[in-house]
Image: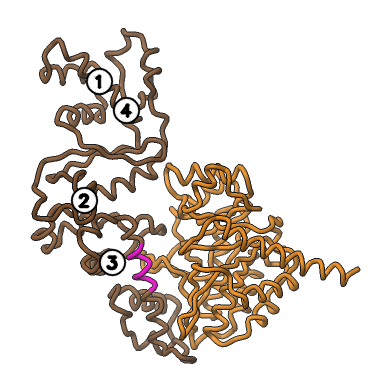
Chain colours: A orange, B brown
Amino acid sequence: MACCMPYLGHGVGLRPKHYPQVWERTARADWFEVISENFMIRGGRPLAVLERARAVAPLVLHGVSLSLGSTDPLNEAYLRDLKELLRRFQPAWVSDHLCWGSVGGHYAHDLLPLPFTEEALTHVVERVRLVQDRLGQQILIENVSSYLTFVHSRMPEWEFLGSIAEQADCGILLDVNNVYVSAVNHGFAPEQYLRALPADRIGQIHLAGHSNQGTHLLDTHDEAVSEPVWDLYRLAVRLFGRVSTLVEWDDKIPEFEVVRAEAERARLIESEEMGAAYAVSA
Amino acid sequence: MLSLRELQVRFFQAIACAPGRGSGYDPLLVQVVRAHGLLSPQERVSIYARAYFTRLLAALHEDFPRVAAYLGWEQFRLLVQAYLTVHPSTHPSVRNIGHRFADFLATRSEIQAKLPFVPDLARLEWARLEVFDAPDAEPLQLVHLQRIPPEDWPALHFQVIPACLVLHSAWPVHEIWAAEAGELRPEQIQPRETAVRIWRQGFVIYHASMDPIERQALARIQQGEPFAALCTALAPLFPPADVVREVGSLLVRWIEDGLLILRPDR
């Protein structure tokens, strides 16, 4: 079975700065994605805003703390909270990252890199299966930006990601910006990464901005999507067709319309590429 | 070669052992980080160490802006370093990172010596955060009270909404909170026994100091006493002719603030 997420168009990552516009029903997007953990709370404005967002557009939950690659036991309380969110808000799907973020019961609140080994692959596959069993649905896993790799990795990241998706029967949230950032930081061709992924597993695409630190790129989500990332997105559309795409902006967040304009640019690129594909097939 | 478990334990230790002071050097960890490009393996680990501290410092600053203002940025940063060393996050949501910060500040001798009101200021800021996402409730309206037959009043059980907390402090913590940055110098701040209620009405967070009568009355409501017991307890505090009016005005104030609900058995 492949990944069969519905096509939602071009969405915007919903952040607290834009809650007032969601509340006033002036924030429009094809769909919204929110950070799951921000809504694992008991009441108050965020949950009310989420109810309202869901009433106007499809919703997707995107987690940052499932810690799929951690060697700690899965956090059962977290899974219960996530399941409760699924029950209440009925998102189109739920996703998290191919990384680890906790060990020994301590959380780094970061997306830490895994070695691409058989041991890690087997471990993550088992954890993704467990999570999917527990939630009763397929999840998407996202490639992360990284700043180091391990000497004992035995396969490239794209093979690691694709193998996990196939073996665990989950989908892939392809973060095009993360591919680009890691490609620059580790010296591989980002196009090679995209071409190696199993197309039928790609359920969603992320776009975001990064910053250049001189010695490396940092996945800061604090500016517009860069031109090389737009080029890579164009290739992703060519390779994978129409895939629900979302723009993330998490720091120095501009007005909602600026973020939405980025989503519109993604729509235009998709339309150009798909138009070209139709023209060729005709 | 390191097992996955050992790698993760060492990695976390390297980025979190000395928050804000770079990464710990672990030769076994550095050996398994690939060397290439402009950065050494240790510098690559340090990127994660910097991100760890920067992220959590920003989260704590967002949760405790007035504490940070009183401390000054450098002292706040140093205290956050010490706090994270002792209390790394144990919760998947960064929302909870500051839950022990006030108690931690109270243990610091430099705080007790120079800024002894700061731990309670931190408690107030944390209480506002707790109230922000506390469970929702449908508060009682005055119109609801008007529908209650007089004979039912003695046995009425009011409850306080979940999004309401009471903070007791030896300092006028609400005044310290309200002061503009730099308006109050620490030496101007004198101890004064204070009780503050912190609550959410709609989506807005408020806090207000309570006089001893309101403090006692609200405590009795929170303890589940019926209305008649509340009146009996407060009666000696007022002239007999004023008891009903005084208790009534307390009730009206609380209801206008959205503080009360009726116990479900009503």
Label 2 CA crowd tier, 10 Å (few <14, some 14–19, many 20+): many
Q: Amino acid at mark 1?
A: Ser
- Answer yes or no: do the residues labelled 3 and 4 have beta carbons within 8 Å? no
Q: Chain of mark 1?
A: B
Q: Secondary structure at mark 4?
A: strand
Chain of the residue where label 4 is placed in the rendered structure: B
Q: How many neighbours does mark 4 have within 10 angstroms: few (below 14), some (14-19), or many (20 or more)?
A: many
Q: Residue A282 in the image: state x and y as whole percent.
A: 91, 68
**Which residue does the numbered mark 2 point to in the structure image?**
B121
Residue placed under numbered mark 1 in the picture: B249
Label annotation for residue A188 = none
In this view, the mark in front (2 or 3): 2
Residue bearing the label numbered 4: B159
Asked if both marks, 3 and 4, belong to the same chain, the answer given is: yes
Between disc 3 and disc 4, whose residue precedes? 3
Q: Please report whichever mark, 1 or 2, sits nearer to the chain's N-terminal start.
A: 2
Q: Are marks 1 and 2 in contact (CB under 8 Å)?
A: no
Determine the residue positioned at 22% across, 15% down. Answer: B245
Discs 3/1, front: 1
- Mark closest to the chain's N terminus, 3 or 1: 3
Q: Are marks 2 and 4 on the same chain?
A: yes
What percent of the width, then of the height, locates residue A11? 63, 57
**Highlighted range, magenta:** B51-58
The answer for how far apart the CA atoms under marks 4 and 1 are is 17 Å
- Residue A42 found in image quarter: top left
User: Is disc 1 in the same subunit as disc 2?
Assistant: yes
